[in-house]
Image (tube, helix red, strand yellow):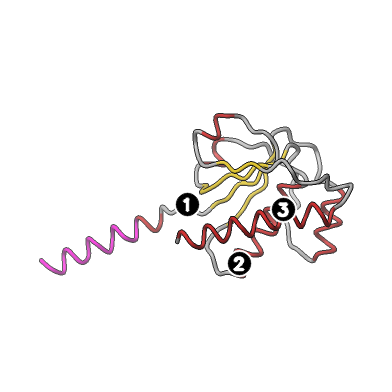
Amino acid sequence: MMLLRLTLALLVSANVLAQEKTTVVFVCEHGAARSVIAAAYFNRLAAERHLPYHAIARGTSPQEELSVATVKGLEADGIAFERAKPRELTEADTKDAVRLMAFCPIPEKFARILRVEEHEDVPDISANYAAARDKIVAYVTALLDEIERSR
């Protein structure tokens, strides 16, 4: 009987762990600059901290290509990033998400799905990549600190 209880407890624990949400969604208007930088730095810093989280970048009104300033800046920083065409934020993106960090206004329906953190004070990437990146990385670091404390 004891073995049966222990087996059942292990199965329940494994199921809970398997269902843990591990995605963070970063959103900016065009899905081509701020969210891309945030996701790239989040993924690097989460890996360095051995955290099982992954970030994706999305836009509320995606443009055709990534921002040239963003691509040049991330390449110069030596940061790996997703080079895919910017994608629009969907409810499916939030399904496995623990948090959504937005650098622009987002539709209210997403705030009803999960916790949203908004930061509309990031400088224009093309005007000052370094200042924008530093502000984004500060937000990303604070988010990772919070996630790490809650584990």
Label drawn at residue 136:
3
Which stretch appears magenta?
1-15
Q: Secondary structure at mark 1?
A: loop
Q: Position of residue 17 (x, y in %)?
A: 39, 58
Counting labels gives 3
Q: Say which amino acid is labelled 2.
A: Ala
In the displayed orientation, state which residue is furthest to the top.
Answer: 108
The local crowd at label 1, few if under 14, some if 14 to 19, many if 20 or more residues have their Cα within 10 Å, is some
Q: Say which amino acid is labelled 1.
A: Lys
Marks 1 and 3: CB-CB under 8 Å? no
**For discs 3 and 2, the disc positioned in front in the rendered view:** 3
Q: Position of residue 126 (x, y in %)?
A: 88, 47
**Residue at image location 83% in from the left, 48% down from the top:** 125
Earlier residue among tags 1 and 2: 1
**Residue at image location 62% in from the left, 45% down from the top:** 101
**Would you say 44 lies left or right of 10 here?**
right
Q: Quadrant of residue 43?
A: bottom right
- Of residues 21 and 104, the one nearer the viewer is 104
Q: Say which amino acid is labelled 3.
A: Ile
Q: Quadrant of the N terminus?
A: bottom left
Residue holding disc 2 = 47
C-alpha gap between disc 1 and disc 3: 23 Å
C-alpha gap between disc 1 and disc 2: 16 Å
Residue holding disc 1 = 21
Earlier residue among tags 1 and 3: 1
**For discs 1 and 3, the disc positioned in front in the rendered view:** 3
Against 72, is 62 above or below? above
**Would you say 65 lies left or right of 39 here?**
right
**Would you say 134 lies left or right of 128 here?**
left
Q: Position of residue 47 (x, y in %)?
A: 60, 67
In the displayed orientation, state which residue is furthest to the front.
Answer: 121
